[in-house]
Image: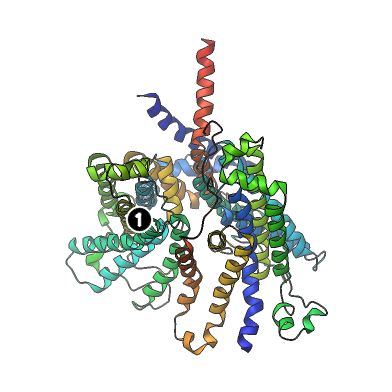
Amino acid sequence: MKMFLDMVPIALMFSAPIIIAALGGLFSERSGVVNVALEGIMMVGGFFAATVTVFMEGVNPALAPWMGMAVGLLAGILFSILHAIASVNLKADQVVSGTALNILAGGLTVYLAQIIFNQQRTRAFSRGLSTINVPGLQNIPLLGKILFQNIYPTFYVALILILLTWFLVYKTRLGLRLRSCGENPQAAASMGIDVYKIRYFGVLMSGAFAGLAGGVMVLTQDIQYTITSIHGTGFIALGSLIFGKWNPWGVLGAGLFFGFSQAISLYAKDIPFLASFPQEFFYLLPYVLTILALILFSNRSVGPKAAGEIYDPGKR
Amino acid sequence: MTRKQRTQLIVPLIAVLLGFIVGGVIIVLTGKSPWGMLLALARTLTGFDFSGRGGFNPRYVGEFILQALPITLTGLAVAFAFRTGLFNIGAEGQLMVGSLSAVAVALLVPAPPVIHPILCLLAAMAGGALWAAVPGLLKARFNVHEVVVSIMMNYTALYFVNWSLLQFGSTDRVKTPDFPPSATLKSEFLTNLTNGSRLNWGIIVVALAVVVFWFVIEKTTFGYRLRAVGFNKEAARYAGMRVERNIVLSMMISGAFAALGGAVITLGTFNFGRVLPSFEGYGMDGIAVALVGGNAAVGVFLSGLLFGMLKAAQPLMQSQGIPKDISSIIQASIVLFVAMRLGIEALLDLTVGKRRAVK
């Protein structure tokens, strides 16, 4: 039980970037654009977040990681514009365009690292983001220890973003338009909605969220940005989106599930039954679990109908 | 040439040209000289040093063809799946499993020369096919998107293969023991011909693979059925084809092609199995090769050479002060431009149409 209590903050640390990136994917796919570039956008966000943190730490160590994450978010938006241009304006196959962005992200970040730092990775930052204790709430018995002590504030950011996403997508006019473009863009257009504009909004939102997620991930789980910093988390986020049925609350559940599966690998050596397995087994566990989750929920998950389709205004 | 064939040829060429221009612009923006990249590429392609010092070294050409071998195979893998309407982003993992299977046969099964590498290659194909069958089956049976599954299979392959390789005994946890001489694809003849490059008999494997790809896809009813499924699933089903079965088979054949790439690297380039810290990018290279090659045998062969050259030029570019990752940037830009095919075609139609109107 004590081990489980220790494990929760670690699991939440792993969950935060998965949830945030998956919410980004939600905006994009709900608007009708499949975004397999979440991984690449996270890489770009992570790189810029790490770089800004390295340079700003000397000036203001408490604020530096937050500035880093803000810049990561902006970089994510800029980078995702490429996906928007390719898949919205130029009718590219969305999966291919996303794959191109993933390749580009690896090349671009390491190239820039060599220009800026003269090495294949960014310089290591000294602190990154620090854990906090929430005053007052941390004294709640049991719950305080799990959710409000030694916890990265990024998990609260993820929670706020879930609420925000839920409100935006389900409670506003913009959200209704967004969803209609993902279900039947021709019908949406006939009601006077500018499908191109809405899809741009969806893709750029996914860029912002995934860029932020990349920064969150590098600044809480790493000491610097390297080409392997993100190691498939963007795709796990994509899996969480499907697993969570394209719904913010579902995404929360899926993100927590994958966060815990990663935390278990850290604690495996202390659990007698699990300690006998080789370390590699725990490395590959989150990926195998993602596949299993996708199989289990495949028949029930119904995604946006028009996601992945090239928008052709002439089609009826 | 019909108009369609013309655009099929012109669009990739434009994409390649634009990709190199993007690379050049980025080099200039970051304060380096694009001249260094051109010199590196020219030297890789021809072996001549154009920087004024002169000199000819065929080793560069040998290494350039060597780099083209595995990515041509992963290119064939991705192209084969594309023809059936599937996106095989898992060539990387299938390649690793193929290399593991080849290592197992090379180290555990004694056999005479010539037979031994053939056994290794067959084992690799079986391993890769099985690994690729998983996303194929899940797609056919549960309609789970093959892209996410394949990526997860790549990471699974990375750790699974690393762990398995160490079971063969290793002194440094980085590589397996060397293979017996009977299993190798290394060629003294080709090495001497190219002044000590690592070029090997893998070229025969690749040549055969290109021919087999062309024959199966273009000349057999089986290939016709696969393409029919790729064109229109429902129409193929209505015509009595077993769509699900074809999806799984296509993924398995695709995986076998990718796995051959792993076997060629292991048996030809290194002669031992390697424990990898991360992906080497052969799967992503394969996607670029397939797209630029128009998913056809000859096209994949040519674009395999193009991207092989880009890969082989990396050390030379690095020595010119240009970070070698510029080649990934160029590659990604080319893929992005090829993906915009419909857009580029529309632009071409527009400009050509205007010119006609003026006349």
In screen coordinates, is A31 left or right of B185? right
Residue at point 52%, 83% (across, down):
A268
Q: What residue does disc 1 label? A: B258
Regarding residue B172, the answer to whether it shows in the image is yes
Chain name for mark 1: B
Position of residue A68 relative to residue B239, above or below, is below
Name the spot of residue A190 as percent of width and height, x first. Answer: 62, 34
Residue at point 62%, 81% (across, down):
A7
- Within-10-Å neighbours for mark 1: few <14, some 14–19, many 20+: many
Position of residue B258 relative to residue B33, above or below, is below
In screen coordinates, is B146 left or right of B266? right
Residue at point 74%, 81% (across, down):
A144
Q: Label 1 is placed on what type of residue?
A: Ala
Seen from the viewer's position, the closer of residues A213 and B36 is A213
Seen from the viewer's position, the closer of residues A301 and A124 is A301
Name the spot of residue B110 as percent of width and height, x first. Answer: 20, 72
Position of residue B187 relative to residue A135, above or below, is above
Seen from the viewer's position, the closer of residues A63 and B227 is B227
